[in-house]
Every structure is written in C-alpha cells, then in structure tokens.
Image (spheres, grey):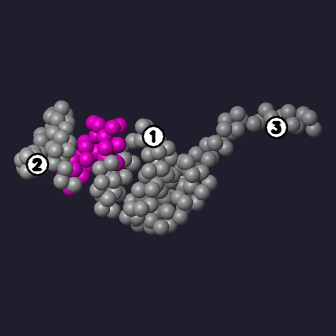
Amino acid sequence: MLSEIKESKEDVNPIDLKNNKDEKELAKEELIFNIQTLVAEGKYKEADKIIKLSLSKNYNDPQMLSLSALVAVAMQDWVQAIARLHVVIKIQGEDTPPLPHLLLIRSYRCSGQLVEAMKAAELAVKTHANNEEIVNEAAIIAEDLGEWESAALALEVLIEMHEMDGKEIPVALKTRLQTAKSLSEVLKAEDK
C-alpha cells in the first residue's frame, strides 16, 4: 500500500496543483465572456443578474465592478451606473484608467447632473490631464454650464494637444474656442 501511495505521488504533475487557480481564472474569463455576449445581444437584465450574483461572492472585484458599471450604462440606469462607477474609482484610486472616469462624467451628464459631471471631470483631469476625451468632456460641461472662461481654458488645452500630436485642428474646435472666449469677454464686461 505504501508503494502505491509513493507511485501515485510520483504520477502527480506539479503543474496540475496550480490548475485550481487556472480553473478559477478560466471560469472567470468564461463568466466575463458570457456577460459580454449577453450585452452584445441586448440582454442587459440577464447580464446584470449574473454580475450581481458574482459580486455577491466577491464585491471588491474591480473587473466585475467595471463590467457592472458598463451594463448599467448600457441599460441607461444612470443611478446604478454612477453608484457603481464611484465604487470602481474608489477601489482603484489614482490607478483608475480613463474609461471609468469618462463613463462617470457621461452618466452624470445623461442624468442632467451637470455640476456633479463637472466635479467628476475635474477629478479625472487631475490623473488624466493628457486624455483628449476627458478634457473635451470638461469643455463640453463648462459650455453647458455657461462657465465660458473654464470652457475656453479646456478648449485651448485641446488645441495644444492637437498641435503637439501634429493633428489638424478641427474647425468646430476653433469655433467653440472663439465662442467661449467671446462669451467670457461679454460676461466680464457685464460684471464691470
């Protein structure tokens, strides 16, 4: 009997001992693929149920939290999207990539919460100052709020980004900047 145990130990491949972790990773990848498939098919509620079940087992999983936020955005459930994106950004901190910030800004905008959208844009710009989409969102929100001086500043930054990248500056961007500067001057003149 002892010789059988010894032989069975020799037959065990050390890599097989790692397979539990690999199986978990594969199961998670399969789960993510299934969620993405459901979203692609427009089955948002089913995807959301699977995500909620997964999060009930591990609430701080950044990948699942990000997916849950994406599903909430796809469902246009702005309250849930905002809440979930705040959790993602809180967990990831300064390491948060641009996408969650962009989704949070846009979720606030879509729900009509422009002041909150501006606060989210200001936070995003602190860690992603070179991200054109984030700077453009800040400019759009400033324009929507009538904060023309802030809008002009953000639009100038966007133009500098285009110039640094050797890109042609779109006419619409130049027009937006000129409009923001003009309206900023008008407001300054009225304040005098």
Quadrant of residue 98 within the rendered picture: top left
Asked whether residue 175 is in view, the answer is no
Q: Do the CB atoms of the residues marked 2 and 3 lie less than 8 Å apart?
A: no
The image quadrant that residue 155 belongs to is: top left
Does dot 2 land on a helix, a strand or a loop?
Answer: helix
Label 3 sits on a secondary structure element that is helix
Amino acid type, residue under disc 1 in the picture: Gly
Magenta residue check for 132: yes
Is 187 positioned to the left or the right of 10 in the image?
A: left
Separation of residues labelled 2 and 3 (CA atoms): 87 Å
Bin the neighbour count of mark 3 within 10 Å (Cα to Cα): few under 14, some 14-19, many 20 and up.
Answer: few
Range shown magenta: 120-144
Judging by the rendered image, the residue that carries numbered circle 2 is 191
Badge 1 element: helix
Residue pointed to by mark 3:
8
Q: Position of residue 90 (x, y in %)?
A: 47, 45
**Direction right: furthest residue:** 1
